[in-house]
Every structure is written in C-alpha cells, then in structure tokens.
Amino acid sequence: MLGQGNFTVWKCPADKVMVTVQGRRLPRVRSNSMSQVFDFGGWLPASSWRVYAKGSDIVIPAKTWVLGDEHPDSINDAAMAVKIAKPDAKTADIVDYPASFHNGACGFSYADGHSEIHKWIGSKIKAPVKNTGMSLNVPAGDSVKDIIWWSDNTTVAR
C-alpha cells in the first residue's frame, strides 16, 4: 500500500511548516490532499461536472489532478475542493487554497501518472501561512485566471 511505513510520500519536501504537538515543535505530517472529484464533488456542483469513482471513469487523465499540495492553513479534511469556474468567468471563488511552497507555485500529480509544478499568477491564491484556519469559499479577486486554470485541470462538464 502506498505510503505504508513511509509517510513522507504525503508531504512535499518544500513544506517547512511546523506544528506544535504536546508542547513540541514538529514538522507537519502531510501537505497533499486529494481532489474532490474523487469523492462526491460537493463544491462543483456534481450535477454539472463529472466526479470519478474509478480510474476508467476519468475523461482526460492528463488534465485531471489527483493529489495536490494544499496550503497549510487550508487543510481541514482529506480533500482539496475547487469551485469550478468556466473559461470565460469574470469572477470566481477559492474554496480550499493550494500551497505555494515553490516560489508561488504548487505541486500536482495527475491521473495519467505525470506531475507538475504550477506557478500561480494572482496574489489572492498565494495567501501567507499564518498557522491558523482559513475561510472557505472566498472571492478570488486577482486570482480568477488561476481558478480557471485549476478548474480546467480538475474535471470536465457532464
């Protein structure tokens, strides 16, 4: 089983964020979260966008991210949600924040087996780490193009 006995596969080596556990400062256990399209797709909404129960359901594996680095303050469950924005969107929302560990960029692995580091262009999506929780579903502001890119690499319309 992937990661059994070696949990470091679930954490980006560039993630240097520490947490306090019983008074001790320790590195976080993980930074990766799975795309919401592999569960019920609650932020999509699933009635308009495809969700995937098995690998053979995936329409475009090379444009379907499976795991991504999530912002340390955004991790609140096992999934990273994207509220899909269409290519012509003028506004968008950020549900869960991606990480920007790589000088304003985020690591993603895709259903076809490749991975990439994607550089964000807007400032809103590159929120600073504050070691507190983050609000969900906030206006993307100058990061609308980032959400459009992320949407295009998440799923396809039904």
Image: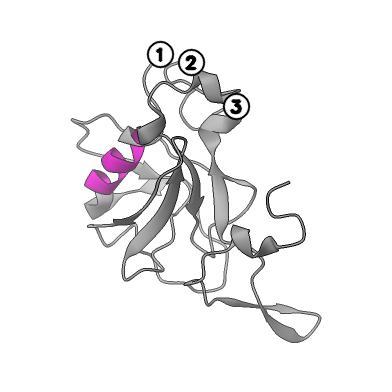
When the figure is inspected, residue 87 is found, relative to residue 139, above or below; the finding is above
> Which is more N-terminal, label 1 or label 2?
2
Q: Amino acid at mark 2?
A: Ser
Tell me the element at label 2: loop
Name the residue tied to disc 3.
40
When the figure is inspected, residue 45 is found, relative to residue 26, above or below; the finding is above
**Residue 128 horizontal side relative to residue 122, left or right:** right
Write the start and end of the magenta stretch as one range: 144-151
Tell me whether circle 2 and circle 1 mark residues in contact (CB < 8 Å): yes
State the mark number for residue 142: none
Magenta-colored stretch includes residue 99: no
Number of the front mark, 2 or 1: 1
Q: Amino acid at mark 3?
A: Phe
Q: Nearer the viewer, residue 23 or 3?
A: 3
CA–CA distance in space, label 3 to label 2? 10 Å
Which residue of the protein is positioned furthest toward the bottom in this rendering?
24
Residue in view at x 59 percent, y 23 percent: 54
Q: Amino acid at mark 1?
A: Arg
> Which is more N-terminal, label 2 or label 3?
3
Tell me the element at label 3: loop
**Residue 137 horizontal side relative to residue 131, left or right:** left
Name the residue tied to disc 1.
158
Residue in view at x 21 percent, y 31 percent: 87
Tell me the element at label 1: loop
Mark 2 closeness class: few <14, some 14–19, many ≥20 residues within 10 Å: few
